[in-house]
Image: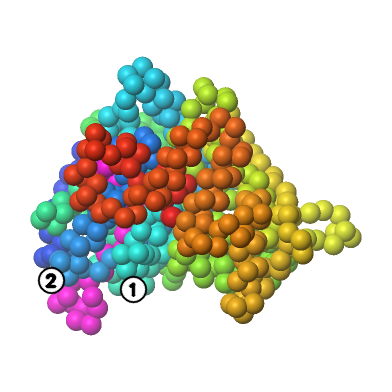
Amino acid sequence: MGVKGLQYFMETCSPEICLPVDLRQMAVAYTRGHHDIIPTVVVDGMACLRYWYQCQAWVHGGQWREYMHLLEKFVGAFTAAGLRLVFFFDGTVEEQKRAEWVKRRLRVNKDIVRIFHYIKDHCQQPDGEMLCLPSGLATFTRFALKSLGQETWCSIREGDFEIAEYALCNKCMGILGQDTDFVIYDTVPYLSISKLRLENMTTVQFSREKLCDILKLQKSDLPLLACILGNDIVPEHRLHFLRKNALTSYGKKNKGDKILSVADFISSVRPNNDGMHGISLMPLSKVDKELVEKGILSYLLPGQTSPWLESILPSQERMCVMEKYINKDILQAAKEKHVRAECFMIYNVLHDGVVECSNTLEDEEEPELLPQAILYQLIREHIYCILLPELPASCGHTLSVKEWFVFPGNPLNEPNKVTPKAPNLPGGTPDLMGLWFGNESEVKSVRLSTFLAVFDLQDLSQDLDHFDSSFVAVICLTTYIAIQAKHLSLEDIDAYLSQAVCIRYKSYTELKQTSVSDMSIISLWGPPDTLHLC
């Protein structure tokens, strides 16, 4: 994430860029200049997950109650300091960053292999250095924060861009995260989550002004610096020759010489009034030039321009691939729910026909255990059939969904195209307009029967009448797993169900004081990955 080598440069080579700040004092100073605005910090939720998740037991899916307690503590500290929080989470992977996303996912797969080797060799989970966050933690955290009354958003394009844009347009006090891209954007101050100390509300601000002073650059030069050094859009290897030539030409000898040399190079070709300098004079191929231009454009917030761009490039508005197939009201409703972090994946299916699922803790050396991506594929096929319309035969093709799902054995060279499959419903697949916008009393039974049919459990309708909706979800999921995963034992099923029943009635304090000898080990952990929302 971010700009290659920039974090090290700021912290190690030029520590004067790192300004210690007291958030309480910062809030007071902000209020003096903005009398009618509550000091607001925009939080990059994805970057904060490792800071928030400090639970000791994680290998079995995590301790949910403890995690909720830590989130409450985090929110409470900022509230007590008079600060308002707005949380943002990534809601999509832009195609121009797909290659980098794949690269990271494959790298994490290797880490997971090492985790399982450690467990098998030592019969215990590894220490914090090998921590792998519980699967789906980002998704569940959105709902957790909303349950705490926090304003929570999910992006429909690049998450960093939306954070920087929101913070600038709403005159926020700062951005809290751990991504050097926030130094590159010309937006509000960037605050470090890794340096945050809740006990005294202090952290570090990475000053883009001081960075520019040290590098002798202007703020408008920073996007080009990021592209030459390497970021999510311009891979580090693409402009290696440019960095090497800069090192040779400018002869830097100290630590951080790569960044200093690139900065000197940028200064030497900065555009002037006669237009004789700029990207056009850099020794770049046409492909690399276009890539750099895209990279620069990705950092420009609304109303901002760059002297490095020779012409106005097309808008980066996310095009709707499925627009001609999907009802506009459906698409708008899905977008609104997605942005408010009230649903997951649905908008991406309806808008792009593409979804992704990141790494899960699965052992690639246990072929008898079905990867979760394959185990739940039937459910997704049924959901896709409900979401996507059936095309007339004259079209000559059917709609499918491109899945970028990470699981053992999947090289991620290309997405897996999944074709919708109709669930077994007597009256056929219900119309999505009716399910979403129909009168509550008329469609309630249809919604329930459709939900059960997604799991292929429509015969359980009468048996589930006595349970509330959260237990119905648990029962359906557990029953589906028991049917699909032949290796599952009765004890496994008991473990799933007991977590759903027991944990919900115990507080964090009660669980913390409960020893393994007093209670089954399964009751000490929060719900497994797939049950956290129940």
Q: Which mark is residue 170?
A: 1
Question: Which residue is situated farthest in the right direction here?
Answer: 394
**Residue 251 to residue 292: above or below:** above
Residue at 51% across, 22% down: 365
Q: Is residue 103 visible?
A: no
User: In the visual, does 529 lie left or right of 420?
Assistant: left
Pinpoint residue 152: horizontal percent, then vertical percent.
Answer: 38, 65
Q: Earlier in the sequence, mark 2 or mark 1?
A: 2
Q: Which mark is residue 207?
A: none
Residue at 65% across, 62% down: 449
Which quarter shows the N terminus? top left
**Residue 111 to residue 188: above or below:** above
Q: Which mark is residue 28?
A: 2
Tag count: 2
Q: Is residue 51 rendered magenta in the image?
A: yes
Question: Which residue is situated farthest in the bottom direction here?
Answer: 36
Which quarter shows the C terminus? bottom left
Pinpoint residue 425: horizontal percent, then vertical percent.
Answer: 73, 59
Pinpoint residue 428: horizontal percent, then vertical percent.
Answer: 76, 62
Give the amino acid type for the residue marked by disc 1 in the picture: Asn
Give the amino acid type for the residue marked by disc 2 in the picture: Val
Asked where in the image residue 249 lies, by quadrant, the reply is: top left
Model colouring: rainbow
The segment highlighted magenta reads 30-55
Residue at 31% across, 64% down: 148
Q: Mark 2 packing: few (<14 Cα in 10 Å), some, or many (20+)? A: some
